[in-house]
Structures are given as structure tokens and as C-alpha cells.
Image: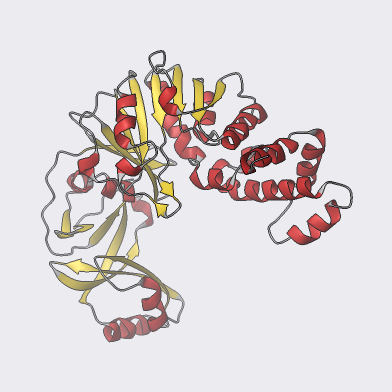
């Protein structure tokens, strides 16, 4: 029996009554308890089954951050599946977009352990989920059943290139962007390549292709709307949409979760650069990736602090969900001694260091500052008008 078959047999043992009982017993399992728990359980259960159950319990703990504790406690995972699966909040957003487009039947290609298929099915969309890994397919099938979605999710193990797409309203492709050497940055080195995914996308009325957030804008195919999605301030993914009709007028979109606020555009020229004014705005990462800083600047009547730096500045405070506002108290040439003296004078013990356009590492600077005192300060290490600059200030909470 080859290694793949052994893995599947080991996984399927977890679906038996004995395996389910073990998993239930491990519901409160925490990493670090492996040896003691394994020793106890092996007195009454097969060692291989115990090992599989403990491994699965650990994966469920890791997956809770992406899927929520309630779903993760019922689902099944592989190590790669936990790492590569879409966060549920992001998958739910994409499923809602497909639903709004009127999609009723979708082919989910390179479907993995089923995170996106689950979100789509919960939106009422029938899904054909296709993956080439037998173990991954077995796990995805078990997840659909565990969540009561096996009536809407149909799992197929095979090559995505063999799927006939003409009968589907939409296609979603999530190609592998990692190899044994780490992340893959060339879209044509994805598995399958981006060019194949684009060809597949054009065979259905609607399509979405998941790509790395750092995809070069020149790699976005003609006719595609490119959406960058952040969740709680962290950029999670980029998606190329086909069939939405938005590409010509608004080729770029930034979506900020959990609120689901969206900014579109991509046609405005860069805002002008000028001196740092009273307020500094730090655009969300999705806005920066989508090259929509100019759209935010227009809303705020703001300019750049430097032609190469994505910080905006303005005299007036205006609320926006697309950037965090700071009130700037000091604009200084970079100098460690001056900074230490200022923080000591102001009794600053909590220093938040942000950088953009500076080679200095925030942790290294904090160690050198050795701040003490009851007050706090945000320090920006950046460039302003081409010169290394320190900006000191405080976040304006009401501006979000």
C-alpha cells in the first residue's frame, strides 16, 4: 500500500464510530499535551488511530482562526489545507458576490478541503468541487457531510482540465501558489498556470480567479476586474473577476472586511506631494495594493507626503473607512538621539513604530529607544519630500 493510500485509510478511520468517539474525547485538546494524552488513549485504542485523532484535534485548533471555533470543531483538515484554505470571512464575501450576480451552479476548481465550496453552498449555490489529491477530496467530502452541505456540494477527484465548464454559471479557480521551495510569485508558475485559468474563466458567464496579493498589475488580463481583499487590516488575497462588467470603468477594487466596504477606481493620476500637514492618513493595505490611494486622496482632499510613499496628509480631519488617521505633533529629520530625548521628555513608555520607505526595523528601534513612562506615541519612519523623516503623533480613533 503506497503512502497516499495509507493516509486516506488513516483519515477514514476517524469517520468510524471509534474515531468519532476519540475526536469527541479530544474536543478540549491543547497543543503540548500530546505525549500524556497519547499514552492514556493507547491503553484502549489502536496507536495509529490515536495518532491520527490527536493530529486532527491539533489541526482543528489551528483552523479555528480561519473557520471559527464552531465549524472547525466539526470539520476535518490536512496541514496544507489549514495553511492554504481561504478564511471564512473572505470566502463568504466572494460567495455573496457570486450570489448577487445570479450564479446558481458553479465549478470550484482546485477546491482543496472545501472552504470556498462551503461558503458558496451556504449562499445557496450548487457546487462541483474538483481537486486532484485523493486525500484532500476525502477530507472535503467529509466536511460537506459534517456541515450538512453534501446536498449542494458534489466532490470530484481528478484533473481540473478535464472538467466541462459549459453547463456552469460560474467558475472559481484557486491554483496552487506554493511549491516545495516556498511561495510562487510568477503567475505562470501557478498550478495550473494563470493563462490556463483565464482560458477556463472565459468559458462561463462569470468567473473569479484567486491570485497572490502581490500580483503585478501588468499581469492582470484584459477585461478582468482585480479585487484586493483585506480582513481586519491584513491583505488576504487578490481575485480576478470576469463578467462583472466593471473592468472598463473601474478596473480595480479594494474590499475591507469585516465591514464589507468597497472602493473602486483605478483611473485617477497620483495625487501631488507636499509638506506634512496636521493629519496623516495610512491607507489600508488593500487600497495600496489596488493602486487606489488617489481615490482616497480625492475623498480626503489630501496629498502625498512624498511621491514614492503611500501616506496621505491633510489639514482637515475627515472620516474614511479606507485609511487610519493620525494627528501629527512633530515632523523631524531622522535622528535617534533627538527621538530618545523627546520621548523621555514626554514620558512615553509605549511606542508604536511604523515604517514606509525606511530601512530601519521597528523592533530594532524600540530596543534602542528603551521607552519608559505612562504615555504612548506613534512614530513613523519614512521619507517626506525625499528626505528621511520621523513623524510623531497619535491615532484619531473617531476617524475610522
The residue that appears at 15% across and 38% down in the rendered structure is: 267
Q: Is residue 327 left or right of residue 35?
A: left
Q: In the rendering, at what x and y percent does residue 288 appear?
A: 27, 49
Q: Position of residue 117 (x, y in %)?
A: 51, 29
**What x and y, as percent, mark residue 159?**
46, 28
Rendering quarter of residue 73: top right
Q: Residue at x 42, y 36 (%)?
A: 174
What coloring was used for the rendering? secondary structure
Q: Is residue 302 visible?
A: yes
Say how many tags the image has.
0
Residue 88 versus residue 79 in the image, above or below = above
Taking the view exactly as shown, the residue that stands out farthest to the top is: 167
Along the horizontal axis of the image, is 297 left or right of 92? left
Residue appearing at x 18%, y 28% in the figure:
248
Q: Nearer the viewer, residue 239 or 380?
A: 239
Residue 73 visible (yes or no)? no
**Position above or below: 198 against 269:** above
Q: Residue furthest right?
A: 44
Residue 25 position, x and y percent, is 80, 45
Residue at (51% x, 27% y) in the render? 158
**Residue 210 location, quadrant:** top left
Q: Quadrant of the N terminus?
A: top right
Residue 102 to residue 323: above or below: above
Please give left or right for residue 391 compared with residue 236 in the image: left
Amino acid at each position: 500500500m503506497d503512502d497516499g493510500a495509507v493516509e486516506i485509510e488513516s483519515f477514514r478511520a476517524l469517520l468510524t464510530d471509534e474515531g468519532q468517539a476519540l475526536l469527541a474525547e479530544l474536543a478540549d485538546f491543547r497543543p503540548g499535551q500530546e505525549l500524556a494524552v497519547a499514552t492514556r488513549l493507547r491503553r484502549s485504542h489502536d496507536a495509529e488511530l490515536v495518532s491520527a485523532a490527536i493530529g486532527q484535534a491539533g489541526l482543528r485548533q489551528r483552523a479555528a482562526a480561519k473557520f471559527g471555533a464552531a465549524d472547525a470543531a466539526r470539520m476535518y483538515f490536512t496541514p496544507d489545507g489549514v495553511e492554504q484554505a481561504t478564511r471564512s470571512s473572505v470566502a463568504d464575501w466572494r460567495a455573496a458576490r457570486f450570489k448577487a450576480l445570479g450564479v446558481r451552479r458553479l465549478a470550484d476548481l482546485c477546491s482543496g478541503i472545501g472552504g470556498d465550496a462551503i461558503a458558496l453552498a451556504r449562499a445557496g449555490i450548487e457546487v462541483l468541487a474538483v481537486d486532484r489529491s485523493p486525500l484532500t477530496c476525502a477530507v472535503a467530502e467529509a466536511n460537506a457531510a459534517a456541515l450538512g452541505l453534501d446536498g449542494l456540494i458534489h466532490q470530484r477527484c481528478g484533473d481540473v482540465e478535464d472538467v466541462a465548464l459549459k453547463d456552469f454559471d460560474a467558475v472559481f479557480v484557486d491554483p496552487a501558489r506554493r511549491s516545495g521551495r516556498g511561495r510562487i510569485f510568477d503567475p505562470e508558475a501557478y498550478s495550473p498556470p494563470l493563462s490556463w485559468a483565464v482560458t477556463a474563466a472565459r468559458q462561463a458567464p462569470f468567473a473569479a480567479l484567486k491570485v497572490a496579493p502581490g500580483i503585478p498589475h501588468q499581469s492582470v488580463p484584459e477585461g478582468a476586474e482585480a479585487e484586493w481583499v483585506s480582513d481586519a487590516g491584513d491583505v488576504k488575497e487578490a481575485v480576478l473577476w470576469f463578467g462583472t462588467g466593471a473592468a472598463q470603468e473601474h478596473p480595480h477594487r479594494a474590499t475591507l472586511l469585516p465591514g464589507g466596504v468597497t472602493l473602486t477606481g483605478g483611473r485617477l493620476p497620483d495625487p501631488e506631494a507636499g509638506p506634512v500637514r496636521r493629519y496623516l492618513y495610512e491607507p489600508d493595505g488593500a487600497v495600496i495594493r489596488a493602486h487606489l490611494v488617489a481615490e482616497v486622496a480625492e475623498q480626503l482632499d489630501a496629498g502625498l507626503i512624498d511621491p514614492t510613499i503611500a501616506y496621505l496628509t491633510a489639514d482637515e480631519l475627515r472620516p474614511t473607512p479606507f485609511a487610519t488617521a493620525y494627528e501629527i505633533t512633530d515632523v523631524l529629520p531622522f535622528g535617534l538621539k533627538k527621538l530618545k530625548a523627546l520621548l523621555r521628555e514626554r514620558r512615553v513608555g509605549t511606542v508604536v513604530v511604523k515604517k514606509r520607505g525606511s530601512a530601519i526595523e521597528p523592533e530594532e528601534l524600540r530596543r534602542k529607544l528603551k521607552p519608559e513612562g505612562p504615555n504612548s506615541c506613534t512614530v513613523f519612519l519614512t521619507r517626506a519630500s525625499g528626505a528621511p523623516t520621523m513623524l510623531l503623533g497619535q491615532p484619531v480613533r473617531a476617524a475610522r
